[in-house]
Amino acid sequence: MQSVAKRSNGSDDSTAAGAVLLAFSAVSASAAYACNGNVCWQTKEKYTYPADSKVVVHEESWKPSADITIREPGAGRGYYAGTEWRTW
């Protein structure tokens, strides 16, 4: 039988290991920018957008230029066409 070391606060090493894994998974979550023309929004999901949407997805390290407008994403899966949020 394997012994589990108890910490002074009463937790065991497996609890601490789980917390570390959870912390790393939260850090590794990435975001990207999706853009249609000069209108962009941040997205955590990398969708395959409809071909006629002309959406381009940039990685998290992408930096928008001064002529880019960053908007809040609309509700649900979608994209901006001008000022309109279109879902599909």
Image (cartoon, rainbow, N blue to C red):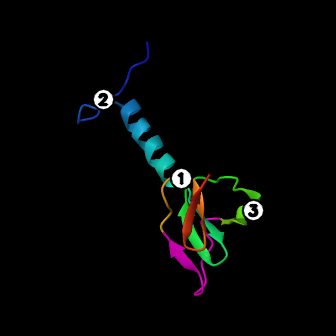
Residue 69, image x, y percentages: 55, 79
Q: Outermost residue, right direction?
A: 51
Name the mark on residue 6: 2
Which label sits in the foreground, 2 or 1?
1
- What is the spatial separation of the Cα atoms under label 3 and label 1, in whole angstroms? 29 Å
Q: Which residues are magenta?
A: 59-71
The answer to whether the residue labelled 2 contacts the one labelled 1, judged by CB atoms less than 8 Å apart, is no
Residue 39, image x, y percentages: 59, 75
Of helix, strand and loop, which mostly describes the magenta segment? loop
The answer to whether the residue labelled 3 contacts the one labelled 1, judged by CB atoms less than 8 Å apart, is no
Residue for badge 1:
29
Which corner quadrant holds the N terminus?
A: top left
Residue 65 included in the magenta stretch of the image: yes
Residue 38, image x, y percentages: 63, 78
27 versus 64 height, above or below: above
Residue 49, image x, y percentages: 69, 56
Q: Nearer the viewer, residue 18 or 47?
A: 47
Residue for badge 3:
52
Of the numbered discs 2 and 1, the one sitting upstream in the chain is 2
Q: Nearer the viewer, residue 29 or 84?
A: 84
Q: Nearer the viewer, residue 34 or 28?
A: 34
Name the kind of residue labelled 3 in the image. Answer: Asp
Q: Secondary structure at mark 2?
A: loop
